[in-house]
Image (cartoon, rainbow, N blue to C red):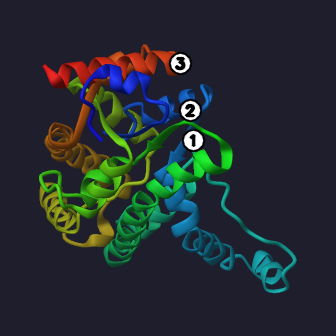
Amino acid sequence: MLFKSADEFIKSPNRAVTVFGMAGVGKTRLSAMLRASNWFHYSADYRIGTRYMGEAIVDNFKREAMKVPFLADLLRSDSIYISSNLTFENLDPLSSYLGTPGDPDKHGLPLAEYQRRQEQHRVAEIAALHDVPHFVERAKALYGYDNFIADTGGSLIEVVDPADPEDPVIKTLAGATTLLYIRGTGSDAAELIRRFKKSPKPMYYPPQFLVEKWAEYKLIHGILEDSDVDPTGFGAWGFEALLHDRLPRYQMLADNFGYVVEASDLALVRDGDEFIDLMAAAIDKRMR
């Protein structure tokens, strides 16, 4: 959904935008702000963690609870129930389910189990992205929202081919929304890595990339057994490697199918009107 002019976007009675970029670059902050300006907020991660992976997440909680005899007896007698309190701002239930591979004594997962959960996430993310057009229509028909923002995870770029106009996910998103890349700088990347170490987010690795980086990490640190890998160490190292690998593909997706705004400019936006102005500037820039 590209525009002939910035004025066309400004005057459009219905706006739908899908934002993408690095995890932590400001997509959810923007979406929450626009929600307060009467935009419908669709969170792909929330959809993944509720509609498509909610049962697996809760079953994992129950599996851990069953290790405690007191809780196991209560669960068996239906005296208690366990649920996930996943929200747009709190994705910890999804993060904890995806986990990190490594030493089980440090809460790491066996690599094969981690890969199984990664595949679950890949399938769920594709499904959640294909749901976007339905929610664009639903937001208007059911709730009366004229404006719509789809907040996607950093791993969107892993389930599309940014060079292929026939890619099913790209066709779905670009057919119903405007794609907008929130682009960070090198200093932004360093800050995101620092924040990730403090508060990890859900991570999805392309299967071959994961195998290669897992082997590389073990080689660098002289580790022979998978169970000797420090999950926290690999998680932070893997996030940094994946972040840098994604950057040129984010740019390719924007160049081919959408627009770009700088994260530093977006940080100054205070409401829906200012966001529309920022989008208009991005449209003008692409046209030039």
Residue 172 numbered mark, or none: none
Foreground of the two, 8 or 199: 8
Q: Quadrant of residue 12?
A: top left
Closer to the camera in the image, 108 or 177:
177
The residue that appears at 13% across and 59% down in the rendered structure is 216
The amino acid type found where label 1 is placed reads Glu
At 29% across and 47% down in the image, what residue appears?
A: 239
Q: Nearer the viewer, residue 257 or 185?
A: 257
SS for callout 2: helix
Please identify the quadrant where the C terminus is shown.
top left
Disc 3 from disc 1: Cα separation: 19 Å
* Residue 271 circle label: 3
Residue 7 in the image, given as x and y percentages of width and height: 34, 19
Q: Please state the horizontal and vertical placement of residue 183, each as a whole percent of the image.
A: 26, 30
> Counting residues from the N terminus, which is met first, the one under dot 3 or under dot 1?
1
Q: Are marks 2 and 1 in contact (CB under 8 Å)?
A: yes
Q: Amino acid at mark 3?
A: Asp
> Residue 233, can we see it?
no
Say which residue label 1 marks.
89
Q: Amino acid at mark 2?
A: Ala
The Cα–Cα distance between marks 2 and 3, rounded to whole angstroms, is 10 Å
> Toward which corner of the image does residue 58 lie, by quadrant?
bottom right
Query: Where does label 2 land, which residue?
Result: 32
Q: Residues within 10 Å of mark 3 (few under 14, many from 20)?
A: some
Q: Label 3, secondary structure: give it.
A: loop
Q: Point out residue 242 in the picture as x, y percentages from the top left corner.
A: 22, 49
Q: Where in the figure is residue 199, as x and y percent of width and height?
A: 47, 42
